[in-house]
Image: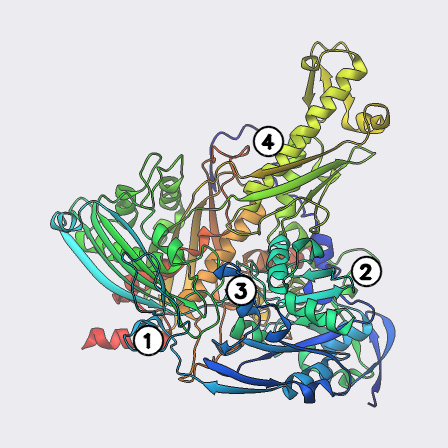
Amino acid sequence: MAVVEENPGYKWVGTRPIRPDGLEKVTGKAQFGADLMLPGMLFGKVVRSPHAHARIISIDTTAAEAMVGVKAVITGSDFPDLAANGAHPSEIDVANNTIAREKVLYEGHVVAAVAATTRDQAEAAAKAVEVTYEILPHVLTVDEAMADDAPLLHEGMITKGVDPAPEEASNVASKILHERGDLDQGFGEADAVVEREFTTKPVHQGYIEPHAAVADANSDGRAHIWCSSQGHFQMRAYSASVLGISPGMLKVTAAEIGGGFGGKTVIYLEPLAVRLSQRAGRPVKLVMDRDEVFRATGPTSGTRIKVKMGVSKDGKITAAEVWMAYEAGAYAGSPVGAAGMTAIACYDIPNFVVEGYDVVCNKPRVAAYRAPGAPMAAFAVESVLDELARDIGMDPIEIRLANAAVEGTQASYGPKFPRIGFVETLEAIKDHPNYTAELGPNQGRGIAAGFWFNAGMMSSATVHINENGTATVVTGSPDIGGSRQSMALMAAEELGIPYESIKAVVADTETVGFNDVTGGSRVTLATGAAVVDACRLIVEDLRARAAKTWDVELDQVEWVDGQAQHAEGAQPPLSLKDLAAKSGRTGGPISANASLNSRGVGAGFSTQLCDVEVDPETGVTRVVRYLTAQDAGRAISPDYVEGQMQGGVVQGIGWALSEEYIHDSDGVMENPGFLDYRIPVASDLPMIDCAIVEVPNPAHPYGVRGVGEVGIVPPMAAVGNAINDALDVRMTDLPMSPVKILEALNDQGD
Amino acid sequence: MARTHVTTVVNGDETEFLTEDSTSLLNALRDEVGLTGAKEGCGTGDCGACSVMVDDKVTCACLVFAPEVDGSTILTVEGLADSGELHPLQQCFLEGAALQCGICTPGFLISAKALLDRNPDPTETEIRYALAGNLCRCTGYDKIIRAVQEAAREMRGQ
Ligand code: FES
Ligand code: FES
């Protein structure tokens, strides 16, 4: 079911053919990060800190180096001191997170790495590296880190965004603030006010493929890296910076990527593999174990969020006050900035204050996770809005409609919204049979909405016409969820040739122009626009060649259905195949490049409807029905748009009900495996119903907005609101585990 | 170091390899036999990405020591297609967009084949429980379940 507007009758865009990379993936041929084997390749292993916070007194590698099969051992001292070289603080953080120098800041922080001829030898050598630590006191949560006498992770950290700047260092890296109107006046006008405090735990992106990298270094300083990454150009830049070399010395090939969700936009293993390979003179493969993935990569922030909102009797939100603190992990850079911008962006609110803090603590450095920062804020705001709707006796869709941001609304974070489709997602929910489906005993229904900006950024594409009139579309955006299909569909539409005649590929950093990471839901939007631009250059070229062949003016030639046609029909048409065959006589190979800075993003909205059944005896919540409505702008590839919608929802359901990082009092993670960090499995879930809404983004040739992220924003509140509907208990701490639900039921009985 | 000589039939071919006693079947298949279709998602039996059939039983290859399969018959995802002709499950996964990143796909295909071998007409719930040991983080399982339903229908000749 889709709300489709202005579909001008595309032939390929919006269809559901088989994806270009599908065959390799169902036959086991696809090469993922850990699959590559090179002649003479060594296996590497990383040595990690067992302590949450400690000073490194000494590292003794002599025993490890003397072991059978060991070819290289490296520590932080094998890398340049970027601070001494005047590097940007963020680069220094990346370098120190890759391998610790003076201090380790979380359990799992890398202190050394080894390479040996077999896996077993590498593991044994890693155990033989002797590190002496002076253990320091640690802080694990925003509460501990913000306490007055808290031990500091970074002695010189002065909070940014506070005027005048504080004199004392703290664990608060920065403060953000968004304000409008007059809060007191707004709350004065309210007929109902709700104030609540929420907490969420760090959760991991949970991609099934652990991080992997292979490096092959040459003696002249150049190296080739193959890695599982959401952005091999970014890997190149980060790795070069950590290694202290020019990016051009590195060639990076993106392997097939086994999931990322933001967590593979950063480096962990790549520079280590290069340095080991340089020291050993042989290729080196580094692959993380699952427990290393949990202990040392991702996750996203744990948070504390306070929300106070007021509404008038007619459902208008009169004021909103949001305070939030986000864990950054070991280095500054939690997504609190995005959280502050998105928290109330769905609504047109005259008076608000949104205040946020980026707080470091002794946990792994957070990485992007699908709409980074937005889901936790939405959990808080959408829960409070649900309660306000109940207080004034208003339907949860109606209260959202009464306040929904529309074209022209001044977004809470600044600009005026261009055309957006939030209202359409609310209506799609209302029109769906799930909205009125009957609920059984102990069942409840919840609604929540979410907003995400979607990113644009830089992309390049090259299109080659092959000698038989087929085409190759080359981009540098790793394909994480079917983007090669959307590139090929847009190219087919532009060139007027069948989808099957087009091969879309992802090339290495030396074969195609620069591309920013696959992130921010940007690939179909921005890389897609580059593909469209390149195809249009090709069509221009083809028209010119036809004009020359016919000896007519260019404006006499039209490109229709994959062939050049003479405007007055004075010449028989020339197909792409004909023109390709003649290319040697009409100007040479047919090929075009396009590079761009995205011309405009299209904000994404999602509204979701969740039915749960809660067992009041055990506290176990089961999602029994789920509907997600999302504005895709235009669904180029509806199969994979639905896939993004469904995948985001299910990650959100896991976040809502079962996923969390658990640390003991020493700061050691207690559940670094899928047995105890429980992501949803097939038997936990119903089908996830999708309503694709299409309100085209005016800034994209096909109206694309980007679909990867916003789907994870509403689920936690949708589930929480459904639990509240079933049992009349308001859950404010994620995950909403059976124990907490039973506690809440008990409290309710008191 | 003495290595153990293992003789097996892998995807229909007699296959011999040498391995350490502590090496998992998964690493032996990937490093020694050169079949990298089975993936390591966890190494602890929790994700199913390494699923293969050992003597017709779905097995987490990460939990078995390589020498244990001496004399066994093994099927990996690379052996599912029959002389280039895709298995109906492979075809239905492709047509139904039942994969996004595809890292979990080999494991799902093997587990789903084992299910349909023993139960050609499973209910949705039976499919969900049969695949509960296979984690997918991308799809939310919806399209995977539908693809298995469709393959089951086709294999029953409906
Ligand atoms: S790798 Fe064997 S179950 Fe996960
Ligand atoms: S398709 Fe990515 S884990 Fe299943």
Callouts 4 and 3 in the same chain: yes
Task: Read off the chain for label 4.
Answer: A
Above/below status of A393 relative to A683: above
Which residue lies under the disc numbered 4?
A10
SS at mark 3 in the image: helix
User: Nearer the N terminus, badge 3 or badge 1?
Assistant: 3
Is A683 displayed left or right of A273 in the figure? left
CA gap between label 4 and label 3 equals 45 Å
Residue bearing mark 1: A144
Instruction: Answer few, some or many: residues within 10 Å of disc 3's Cα (few below 14, many 20 plus, some between 14 and 19).
Output: some
Which chain is disc 1 placed on? A
Mark 2 or 3, which is nearer the eye? Answer: 3
Residue A614 x %, y %: 35, 69
Task: Name the quadrant containing residue A24.
Answer: bottom right
Position of A660 relative to A162 (above/below): below
| Residue at which label 3 appears | A94
